[in-house]
Structures are given as structure tokens and as C-alpha cells.
């Protein structure tokens, strides 16, 4: 009896602690939001909010993919380079006098992204190369390949139809934001309501137990990198459309922002625990801080320091939570 | 009641040949501890004499861990007194307890695997010569230590090459090298086989002879009766009884632990021969197991017994598609199966409770619900989407059926006790609707009550026309639950016994 009471009370406390630390990050975001809206009168303006959302959509799409990979206990460092490669491919298809259909260009970008992702996935899932090392190698290879196919030069003169993807609006909402919203909702549904979502969490939580339960663990790990690659390709197409020419040096360091968003959202780097919803909060925090500091005229050098400090703080909070339980 | 118990204690000890003035190394009385106002320990007591192996018994949740953590300075007691060598003490940290000669050897060993044995023993306090480590002295000291303890371990061996039992001996040596006089051993045999246990017991006897006092915690009653000389039982956070092992029998000890009178299990009734449900033919894998052929009949529980490393687990894992094999065919009711992955086995109706529930049985951070349905996701989904209602109903039914004690189906499995975790593993297997259940050490490290429930479940499962392949290192468990026992020795089948002809001696004889 005593034991039962103790168990349930412990469970309650554990759950309470989890709720506080889980939603702590949302609270932090809201506080930040309120402070910034007092600190600068333009922060809450429709124009600025739209601007923030557009700025975060590229990182948002990448961070959603990164959530899949990190949930399986992996990491993908190659996405910035893959994004650049896919951007060049898309740009090459829609440049010049006879541009291809923009949808074809987007599909091609997603396709090559997925191809890179598949190679990463094979290396990690089939050949058991550590994710860090495999994707670090891919970071360098994909960047080199990008420079090779573009000869190191930007691809200019993209068709107006294609540029709509990065610059257009639907009902007053920027197209990239709509793309990000779609990606986010699909990912949320998949992770939360499907068998595949369960597989991802199980593989990340304990790959050997997942296998014992009959889950095709290799396929699941492989697919996470595939999804990540495809989303990096998609983000590459959007970024290219936004910047009006495809740049071979695009996406440098983007992997770090995506990882940062996932980590700030509290998804465990060990795998198995986390949520794409909290990744969204992480993405928004990074975006809002950048925007707020911009508005307040703080140098971008400081912004980097602040961003780094937030990442470390988020992990520290995570640690102390784990230490408690 | 209390008075009577104390009287009994003194009487028992003198009966067992202890002199009254024998040194008390450690005495704890009335130790209590609450967490957030909920008492975990109400009245913890122990009296440990020099040269004694004192078994601390109790089910999961009896308060043993809390009590040990207090002895070790990892937790602060709310009340009670602890006396160490005649001095009232209260440790603020494990370091203080260690400095006062109390060391613990836990279930989870944490040696530095790539260092040598000697380096592990003197980790952090290496003998030095100037700025450098004096390796020669370190090795010489370690050898002298092993000689004194009569441990046969090479001080220069790399830790990784040692068996689990040897690693435990190294941990013990480490504790002794720190001049520890009180040694707490928490489930020391849970990860090692019969033969290795004997090595460990010899070591314990040698320590005993040198006046070390040992608090021995184990769910394995067999071990307790072969090594301990006195016992203390806790139940529901309270001291229940203390006495000499010589004065108590297995049945009564179990009764004290579970708090109700449980008779030692009866062997299973004889059963009619029936057709085979599953048949394994010529399973071999590079000397780990060789030419294993066996079959399990409808309604039968087949026990697999053997020492650690005899190839039982490896064979079972290969059968389930979860481990390598070079050859071997599986027939399910006469139909040949191709099993390359556990998913193949599950689809055919073969489920497995693996030996290491934390390592490859459960996804610890995932919820009770997610774990229970993990093997049967397809059944609870349509077009890839989970059907939450059906799923939750099935999970609740399993929680009820196995009497899993959990605050909610959404609680992470890592928050459950060992016995309840094991029930979740069983529930996961049953949710796949198996006809064959392979269970590898199904009751390892869980309390007596949960064990009984699992035995009852296995018996019932078999009675419904299914087949059970049960691997166990605990002879009484296998004798009480199996209809037929196959003994493995060095990767081969050494013999087969029916429940009627099997005895402890016969099994040990065949296995070694």
C-alpha cells in the first residue's frame, strides 16, 4: 500500500517536473516575445512578424528533418552542403531563355537531396559508420561537388515562376512560410499518429529492443536520413528562389542552426525522446532572438554569442532534468 | 512481538556458533526515510558481525535500496541510528562511507575496460615515483592483494578480457585494497552463471575468514542458502525478522519475504505426449552452439539449462532471428520457416522475452503503452495510422492481466520496478498473439511475488495449446516449471531429462 502510494506520487512528481521543464522552453519563448514587443514598437507589426516567419522557414524545414534524424539517435552535418547542391541543380533548370517548369526544378532539388540522404543513410544504417563521421564526410563531398558543377559561380537569371517559391505570397502569407507550415504539419502527424512515428521513437530509444520487437531498424534509420536529405533539397530550392540566384556557397553552417533548434526544443541527442512541436519552438526562439537583436541594433557578432549561449543553456536545463529523474 | 524477535535473534546467533562478544561491524536501528512525505523506509535494521555473510532479503519495494543507500551515505536518513565499530555515524557522502570502510559492489559494474586489472584497482590512487606512475609497484601490489584473497586473476590482464564474475572479483579486491571491512553486495550473481557464482562464493568465504562483514542482497534464494549465515528480511519498508540461516528453511523465508504463506512450487503434473509445435533442426554457429535439434510440443514447457556461455541464449536468439547462425532449420507445426529477422519470427507466431530487458527488451524512455504494442503495431493501425482507442483498450487490458503496477499507461517504462518492467516485456510478447514463447531468464532480478505471477502465466499459456521454451540458470525454477529439460554443455546438447527424473544433481552433472 505504502509502496503504491509512493510510486504514484513519484510518478506524479516526475510528470510535474517533466511538464515544467518541457514547457519551460515555451515559457521562455513567450517571455522573450513579450520583452521584445515592449523593447521595440515595430516588433509586433505584421510586416516584422511576416519577416521573422519567412526568415525562419528555411531553418524550420531543415530542423524538422533534423528532428527525425536526432530522434533515431543520429545527426546529419551535411545538410548545408546538400542544400547548396540542390539549389544549384534547381537553379540550373530554371535559368536562361528556356526555363523548365518550376515544379520540375523543385522536384529535382528534392530528388538530389534525397539521393545524398540515401548515401548518408546507407553509410549509417547498413555500413554502421558513425553518423557524425559519415555526414561530416558528406558535408565536405557535397560542398566540393557543388563547387564542381557550378564551377564556383552563382547561377543567375532564374525564372519569375520559380522565384515565386521564395518571394511570392498566398493570401498575404509568404510562400516559404506556407511550405514550412506544410512540412511541419505533415511531420507532426507522421511522428505522432503513424506506425512509422512509433518506429522512429523506438529505434532512437533502444535500437536493439526495437529489433527484438520486429521493427525493421535499418530501414527506419535509413529513412530518417532520406527524409532529412529530401527536406534539405526542398529548402535549397526555396533558398535559391529567395536569393534570386543559386549560390554555391549557400547554406554554410546551416546544419548548426538546425541542430541548435532541435536541441533548444529539448529533443534528446541520445535519441528516442523529443517532439517536432518543440523543435518549432526552438526554431522560433532562434529566429525571434536574431530579429529582436537586429531591431535593437545589436551587432550580429553578439547575436552569435547569444545563440551559442542559449544552446548551452538549453542542454544544461536538459541535464539537470535528467539528473533529477 | 518485537521483544520476542530480539530474543530470538540472540538465541539464533549463539545457536549458530557466534559468541556474544563477537565484533559488531555495523549496526543500524530504526532507520527511516521518506520521499516527498511518502515513507519508503519505516524501520530499517541490521546488525552485521565481523566474518559474517548477512543476507538482506525483501521483495521489490521492501526498502532495501533506500536502506543500502543510507548505509552508503548516498541518502540521508530521516531518523534512526547507525553505529560503526562502536561509534555513532552519519555519512554525508559515499566518500565518507568509503573512508569509514564501507564499500558497495553493485549490479552495474563500471570498470575502465581498456585498462589493466591493476590499473583499475588503483585508479585515482596510483603508486607514484616522482611525476610518473609506478607501474611495477602497482602490479606487484595487485598480485600481493590477489594472493592474499586467493583470487586467481592476472593483474596485468586487460579488463575487457575478463568475465563478469572476474570483474566482480576485481571490484571486491578494489574494495579490500581500500581497507573496507563492510562489503555490500547487491545482486552479485544476477549476471553470472552457476560455475562463476562458485568462484565468487569462494572469494566471499575467503573474505569471511579475514573478518570482513558482508551484506548480501539477492533475489536468488539458492545463493542465499549456500553462502549466507544470517538473514534480515524487510517488507513494505519495515524490518520483519532477523536470524541465522541454519534455523530457517526456504519455504519460511519466502513466506517472510512475500508476507503470505507461499508454498514452494509443486513440479508440474505429467502430461500426455502431443505433436510438436516448433522444431529446430541442426542449429550451428561457429562453435558457440553446434548441431542443436529440439522440439517443443503443444502444451509443453521445455526448459533449457546450462552454464553461462554454454550457448543456450545464443541458440535461442538465433532461433528468433536475433542472432547469427550458420545453419539450422525451423519448422512450425511442420511448415518450414525462414527466419532472418525477429519480424519473421513474430509474423509466424514466435515471440521472445530476451535475457536483458534493459538492453534489448524494452525501450526505457518510451511509455508503457508504446512498449506493450511495439511488436504488434500493424494490428492497431489502418493505412499506417495508429488507432488510439483500440490501442489504449488493448494496453489497459494487458496492464490489468499482468497486474503491472504503473501510475498510467503513458508513464515511461524506466520508472517501473524490475518486476513490472518484466511484465511489460511479457505483455508485449503476448500482444503479438504467439504460439511459441521463448523466454530467456524470465525472472532475473525480480521479486518473489512477480516471479510467481510469471510462472502462473507461463503455465496457463502452455495449457492453451502453445509451446514455451524457457531458459534459466536457476535450477529450482527450471525444475518447478519445465515438463522436460535439455541441458547444454559447451554449445552442445549434453542430455535430456523429464521433469520426473530431473534433480538438481543431475542437471549440474550434465552441465559441467
Image (cartoon, coloured by chain):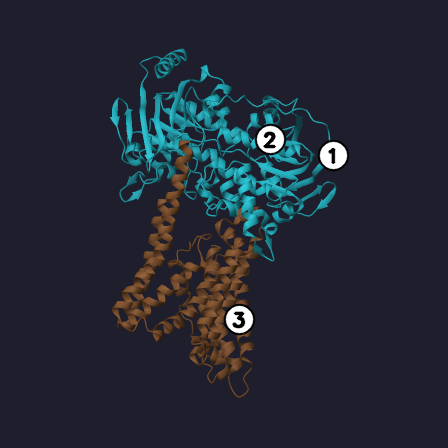
Chain colours: A brown, B cyan
Q: Is residue B412 visible?
A: yes
* B477 to B160, vertically: above or below: above
Q: Identify the residue position indicated by label 1 in the image.
A: B275
Mark 1 in CB contact with mark 2 (< 8 angstroms): no
**Co-location on one chain, circles 3 and 1:** no
Q: Identify the residue position indicated by label 2 in the image.
A: B305
* B132 to B57, vertically: above or below: below
Which x, y percent locates residue A210? 54, 49
Say which element carries label 1. Answer: loop
Q: CA distance from mark 1 to mark 2?
A: 23 Å
Residue closest to the eye, B273 or B459 = B459
Which x, y percent locates residue B234? 40, 25
Q: Is residue B226 visible?
A: no
> Is disc 2 surrounded by few (<14), some (14 to 19) or many (20+) residues within 10 Å?
many
Residue at 25% x, 25% y is: B88
Say which element carries label 3. Answer: helix
* A12 to A310, vertically: above or below: above
Say which element carries label 2. Answer: strand
Which x, y percent locates residue A27? 33, 58
Report in which chain the residue with disc 1 lies.
B
Report in which chain the residue with disc 2 lies.
B
Q: Identify the residue position indicated by label 3 in the image.
A: A110
Q: CA distance from mark 3 to mark 2?
A: 55 Å
Report in which chain the residue with disc 3 lies.
A
> Is disc 3 surrounded by few (<14), some (14 to 19) or many (20+) residues within 10 Å?
many
**Co-location on one chain, circles 3 and 2:** no
Amino acid at each position: 500500500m505504502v509502496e503504491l502510494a509512493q510510486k504514484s506520487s513519484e510518478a506524479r512528481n516526475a510528470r510535474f517536473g517533466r511538464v515544467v521543464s518541457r514547457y519551460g522552453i515555451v515559457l521562455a519563448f513567450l517571455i522573450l516575445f513579450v520583452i521584445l514587443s515592449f523593447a521595440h514598437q515595430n516588433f509586433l507589426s505584421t510586416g516584422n512578424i511576416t519577416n521573422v516567419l519567412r526568415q525562419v522557414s528555411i531553418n524550420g524545414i531543415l530542423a524538422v528533418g533534423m528532428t527525425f534524424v536526432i530522434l533515431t539517435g543520429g545527426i546529419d552535418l551535411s545538410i548545408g552542403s546538400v542544400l547548396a547542391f540542390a539549389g544549384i541543380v534547381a537553379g540550373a533548370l530554371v535559368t536562361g531563355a528556356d526555363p523548365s517548369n518550376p515544379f520540375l526544378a523543385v522536384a529535382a532539388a528534392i530528388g538530389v537531396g534525397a539521393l545524398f540522404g540515401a548515401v548518408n543513410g546507407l553509410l549509417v544504417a547498413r555500413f554502421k559508420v558513425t553518423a557524425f563521421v559519415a555526414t561530416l564526410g558528406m558535408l565536405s563531398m557535397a560542398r566540393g561537388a557543388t563547387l564542381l558543377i557550378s564551377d564556383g559561380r552563382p547561377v543567375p537569371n532564374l525564372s519569375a515562376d520559380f522565384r515565386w517559391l521564395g518571394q511570392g505570397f498566398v493570401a498575404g502569407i509568404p510562400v516559404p512560410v506556407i511550405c514550412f507550415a506544410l512540412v511541419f504539419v505533415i511531420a507532426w502527424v507522421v511522428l505522432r499518429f503513424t506506425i512509422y512515428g512509433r518506429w522512429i521513437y523506438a529505434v532512437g530509444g533502444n535500437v536493439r529492443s526495437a529489433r527484438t520487437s520486429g521493427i525493421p531498424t535499418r530501414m527506419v534509420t535509413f529513412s530518417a536520413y532520406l527524409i532529412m536529405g529530401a527536406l534539405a533539397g526542398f529548402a535549397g530550392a526555396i533558398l535559391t528562389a529567395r536569393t534570386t540566384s543559386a549560390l554555391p556557397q549557400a547554406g554554410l553552417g546551416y546544419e548548426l542552426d538546425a541542430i541548435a533548434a532541435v536541441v533548444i526544443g529539448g529533443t534528446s541527442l541520445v535519441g528516442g525522446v523529443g517532439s517536432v512541436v518543440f523543435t518549432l519552438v526552438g526554431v522560433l526562439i532562434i529566429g525571434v532572438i536574431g530579429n529582436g537583436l537586429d531591431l535593437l541594433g545589436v551587432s550580429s557578432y553578439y547575436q552569435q554569442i547569444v545563440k551559442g549561449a542559449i544552446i548551452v543553456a538549453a542542454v544544461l536545463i536538459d541535464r539537470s532534468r535528467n539528473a533529477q529523474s | 512481538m518485537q521483544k520476542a524477535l530480539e530474543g530470538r535473534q540472540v538465541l539464533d546467533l549463539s545457536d549458530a556458533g557466534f559468541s556474544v562478544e563477537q565484533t559488531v561491524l555495523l549496526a543500524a536501528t530504526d532507520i527511516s526515510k521518506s520521499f516527498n512525505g511518502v515513507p519508503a523506509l519505516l524501520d530499517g535494521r541490521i546488525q552485521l558481525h565481523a566474518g559474517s555473510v548477512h543476507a538482506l532479503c525483501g521483495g521489490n519495494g521492501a526498502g532495501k535500496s533506500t536502506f543500502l543507500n543510507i548505509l552508503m551515505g548516498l541518502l540521508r536518513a530521516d531518523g534512526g541510528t547507525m553505529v560503526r565499530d562502536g561509534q555513532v555515524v552519519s555519512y554525508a557522502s559515499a566518500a565518507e562511507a568509503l573512508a569509514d570502510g564501507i564499500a558497495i559492489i553493485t549490479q552495474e559494474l563500471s570498470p575502465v575496460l581498456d585498462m589493466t586489472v591493476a590499473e583499475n584497482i588503483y585508479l585515482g590512487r596510483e603508486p607514484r615515483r616522482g611525476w610518473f606512475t609506478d607501474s611495477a609497484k602497482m602490479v606487484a601490489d595487485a598480485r600481493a592483494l590477489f594472493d592474499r584473497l586467493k583470487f586467481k586473476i592476472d593483474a596485468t590482464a586487460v579488463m575487457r578480457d575478463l568475465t563478469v564474475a572476474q570483474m566482480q572479483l576485481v571490484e571486491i579486491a578494489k574494495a579490500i585494497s581500500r581497507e573496507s571491512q563492510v562489503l555490500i553486495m547487491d545482486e552479485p550473481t544476477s549476471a553470472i552463471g552457476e560455475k562463476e557464482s562458485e568462484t565468487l562464493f569462494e572469494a566471499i568465504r575467503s573474505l569471511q575468514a579475514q573478518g570482513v562483514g558482508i551484506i548480501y542482497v539477492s533475489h536468488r534464494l539458492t545463493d542465499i542458502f549456500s553462502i549466507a549465515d544470517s538473514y534480515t528480511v524487510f517488507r513494505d519498508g519495515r524490518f520483519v525478522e532477523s536470524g541465522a540461516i541454519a534455523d530457517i528453511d526456504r519455504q519460511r523465508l519466502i513466506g517472510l519475504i512475500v508476507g503470505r504463506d507461499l508454498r514452494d512450487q509443486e513440479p508440474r503434473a505429467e502430461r500426455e505426449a502431443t505433436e510438436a509445435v516448433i522444431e529446430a533442426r541442426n542449429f550451428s554457429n561457429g562453435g558457440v552452439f553446434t548441431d542443436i535439434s529440439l522440439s517443443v510440443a503443444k502444451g509443453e514447457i521445455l526448459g533449457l539449462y546450462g552454464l553461462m556461455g554454454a550457448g543456450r541464449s545464443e541458440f535461442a536468439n538465433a532461433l528468433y532471428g536475433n542472432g547469427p547462425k550458420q545453419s539450422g532449420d525451423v519448422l512450425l507445426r511442420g511448415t518450414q520457416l525462414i527466419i532472418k529477422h525477429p519480424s519473421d519470427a513474430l509474423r509466424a507466431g514466435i515471440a521472445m522475452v530476451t535475457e536483458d530487458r534493459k538492453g534489448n527488451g524494452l525501450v526505457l524512455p518510451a511509455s508503457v503503452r508504446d512498449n506493450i504494442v511495439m511488436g504488434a503495431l500493424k494490428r492497431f493501425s489502418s493505412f499506417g495510422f495508429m488507432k488510439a482507442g483500440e490501442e489504449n483498450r488493448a494496453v489497459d487490458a494487458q496492464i490489468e492481466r499482468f497486474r503491472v503496477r504503473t501510475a498510467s499507461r503513458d508513464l515511461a517504462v524506466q520508472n517501473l520496478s524490475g518486476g513490472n518492467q518484466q511484465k511489460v516485456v511479457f505483455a508485449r510478447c503476448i500482444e503479438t498473439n504467439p504460439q511459441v514463447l521463448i523466454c530467456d531468464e524470465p525472472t532475473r532480478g525480480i521479486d518473489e511475488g512477480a516471479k510467481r505471477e510469471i510462472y502462473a502465466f507461463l503455465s496457463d499459456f502452455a495449457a492453451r495449446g502453445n509451446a514455451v521454451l524457457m531458459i534459466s540458470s536457476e535450477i529450482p525454477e527450471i525444475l518447478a516449471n519445465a515438463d522436460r529439460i535439455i541441458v547444454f554443455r559447451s554449445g552442445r546438447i549434453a542430455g535430456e531429462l523429464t521433469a520426473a527424473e530431473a534433480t538438481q544433481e543431475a542437471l549440474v552433472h550434465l552441465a559441467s
